[in-house]
Image (cartoon, helix red, strand yellow):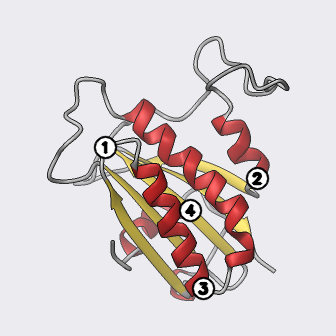
């Protein structure tokens, strides 16, 4: 875990509404292992961070989105043959706070953008909950104010998927 989210600001800048990077009041990040138990760790990290930032009242919505973004990164961005125990965790969660917005961003090693899989229809989620997957992006879209993604450039490889929440 760390508190340096500045490495994420540049790639995110292209897809977020205009903002002044100097206006970031707080940022925090953590590395997540390539195991599904990491989703629980991401939620705990989010709860602790939002509590420190006095945003605990936003936890339910933000944690749901964080859970979906991390689950998608683990499920779709890591190849099945990838070792699940690696020294450098391939998924990283970043939380960044400005005066009027909060951004959750998840970095993973895949260059493929997020999207509904073939056969999934995210615009018509299963009201009975019978489908076990495919609703993640619908939930991200429903609970955040906006979301998007960007491939990483330069020495970094992969992509960042982010969700924005307006505050106040």
| Farthest residue, direction left | 87
Front residue (pair 101, 14): 101
Q: Which residue is mark 4?
A: 104
Q: Is residue 142 above or below residue 61?
A: above
x, y percent for residue 114: 54, 35
> Which mark is on residue 53?
3
Q: Tell me how far mark 4 sits from mark 3, CA to CA.
A: 14 Å
- The residue tagged with tag 4: helix, strand or loop? strand
- The residue tagged with tag 3: helix, strand or loop? loop
x, y percent for residue 6: 40, 75
Residue at image x 71%, y 62%? 60
Q: Which residue is mark 1?
A: 34
Say whether residue 44 is left or right of residue 116.
left
Q: Tell me how far mark 3 sits from mark 1, CA to CA.
A: 28 Å
Q: Earlier in the sequence, mark 2 or mark 4?
A: 4
Q: Tell me how far mark 2 sits from mark 4, CA to CA.
A: 12 Å
Q: Nearer the viewer, mark 4 or mark 3?
A: 3
- The residue tagged with tag 1: helix, strand or loop? loop
| Farthest residue, direction right | 127
Q: Earlier in the sequence, mark 4 or mark 3?
A: 3
Q: Could you tell me which quadrant the N terminus lies in?
A: bottom left
Say whether residue 152 is left or right of residue 142.
left
Q: Which residue is mark 2?
A: 143
């Amino acid at each position: 875990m760390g508190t340096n989210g500045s490495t994420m600001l540049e790639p995110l800048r292209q897809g977020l509404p205009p903002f002044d990077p100097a206006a970031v009041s707080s940022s925090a990040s953590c590395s997540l292992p390539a195991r599904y138990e990491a989703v629980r760790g991401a939620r705990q990290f989010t709860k602790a961070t939002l509590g420190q930032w006095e945003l605990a009242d936003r936890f339910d919505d933000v944690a749901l989105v964080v859970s979906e973004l991390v689950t998608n990164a683990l499920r779709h961005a890591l190849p099945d043959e990838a070792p699940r125990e690696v020294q450098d965790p391939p998924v990283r969660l970043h939380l960044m706070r400005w005066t009027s917005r909060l951004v959750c961003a998840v970095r993973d090693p895949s260059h493929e953008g997020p999207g509904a899989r073939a056969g999934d229809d995210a615009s018509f989620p299963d009201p009975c909950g019978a489908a076990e997957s495919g609703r993640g992006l619908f939930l991200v879209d429903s609970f955040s104010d906006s979301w998007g993604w960007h491939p990483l450039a330069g020495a970094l490889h992969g992509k960042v998927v982010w969700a924005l929440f307006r505050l106040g």
